[in-house]
């Protein structure tokens, strides 16, 4: 049986993770002329909190005090393995900062200020009162989203996946992403500012432990060893009898 030591709540094995990431590192996607298209392909990542087949719905309090269900975007969190080379993503991030937030650049420190970073340490959600399975301290996660249209989801042969059960928290995938600036309203000083990565398309690669805290239980495992005689006269008492 494979052993995973570099990630939490995984049984796919360290060897597969390292081999798959070496075969498919983060890279720019090229267009038909061989030039960068603006989209980036991740290395193999685990998906967390996927809302890919339908938009996430959020309860929003209205002015009259009532609560309405409001549709948000299609979303997923990409959990990157440790030792991932983020050089390309960092380059694209800073290029987007220079394009959209040149006024937030400090010549003295050579850094951008007042911007939200898209790169999050998984450790923030790995421990504490609200800890989540599958999050590994020291590794990076990206919150990916799109509000335009449902991103296509395919298998390794490029066939569309319509079975939603195949896209769950913990499954391995490649994700096509691109950087964009937020918010749209630059005049509101109360809104957060920064660069995020948009969700373009998803390719499912391999199954792993379900980290969503749900999913169907294995009935054979749950009820193994149960030996209760049916009550006398019950139809089940005749099961297996001539």
Image (tube, grey):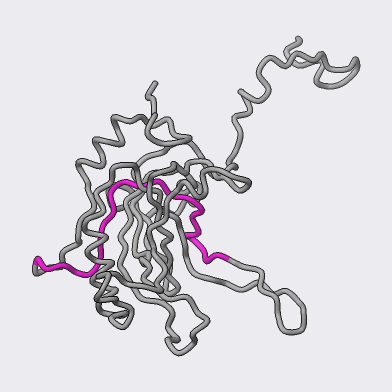
Query: In the rendered image, which quarter is residue 184 located in?
Result: bottom left
Q: Is 65 in the magenta? A: no
- Tag count: 0
Relative placement, left or right, of 39 versus 50 is: left
230 with respect to 98 (left or right): right
Question: Considering the image in quadrants, where does the N terminus appear?
Answer: top left
Q: Nearer the viewer, residue 112 or 117?
A: 112
Q: Is residue 30 above or below residue 125?
A: below
Q: Is residue 55 magenta?
A: yes
Give left or right: position of 35 versus 80.
left
The residue under the point 90% across, 15% down is: 232
Q: Is residue 185 left or right of residue 152?
A: right
User: In which quarter of the view is residue 95 placed?
Assistant: bottom left
Rendered position, 228 above or below 2 = above
Q: Position of residue 38 (x, y in %)?
A: 22, 69
View extreme (top): residue = 242
At 22% across and 56% down in the image, what residue appears? 87
The residue depicted at 29 percent of the width and 76 percent of the height is 106
Q: Residue furthest right?
A: 233
Q: Over which residues does the magenta segment extend?
A: 34-56
Image location (x, y in percent) of residue 139:
38, 45
Comparing 30 with 130, the one in front is 130
Front residue of 69 and 137: 137
Most extreme residue toward the bottom is 187
Q: Is the residue 51 above or below the residue 138 in the image?
A: below
Q: Position of residue 63 (x, y in %)?
A: 72, 84
The furthest residue to the front: 108
Residue 91's x, y, as percent?
22, 64
On-image quarter of the C terminus: top right
Q: Residue at x 59, y 45 (%)?
A: 128
């Amino acid at each position: 049986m494979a052993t995973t030591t570099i990630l939490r709540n995984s049984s796919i094995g360290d060897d597969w993770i390292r081999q798959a990431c070496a075969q498919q590192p983060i890279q720019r996607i090229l267009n038909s002329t061989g030039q960068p298209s603006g989209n980036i392909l991740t290395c193999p990542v685990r998906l967390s909190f996927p809302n890919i087949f339908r938009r996430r719905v959020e309860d929003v309090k209205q002015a009259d005090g009532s609560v309405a269900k409001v549709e948000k975007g299609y979303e997923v969190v990409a959990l990157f393995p440790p030792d991932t080379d983020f050089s390309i993503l960092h380059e694209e991030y800073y290029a987007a900062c220079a394009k959209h937030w040149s006024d937030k650049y400090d010549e003295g420190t050579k850094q951008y200020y007042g911007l939200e970073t898209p790169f999050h340490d998984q450790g923030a959600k790995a421990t504490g009162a609200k800890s989540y399975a599958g999050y590994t301290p020291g590794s990076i996660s990206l919150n990916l989203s799109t509000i335009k249209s449902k991103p296509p989801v395919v298998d390794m042969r490029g066939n569309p996946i319509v079975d939603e059960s195949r896209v769950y928290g913990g499954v391995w995938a490649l994700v096509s992403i691109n950087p964009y600036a937020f918010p749209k309203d630059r005049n509101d000083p109360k809104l957060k500012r920064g660069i995020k990565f948009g969700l373009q398309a998803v390719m499912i690669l391999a199954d792993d432990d379900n980290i969503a805290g749900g999913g169907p239980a294995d009935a054979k495992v749950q009820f193994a060893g149960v030996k209760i005689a049916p009550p006398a006269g019950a139809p089940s008492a005749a099961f297996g009898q001539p």
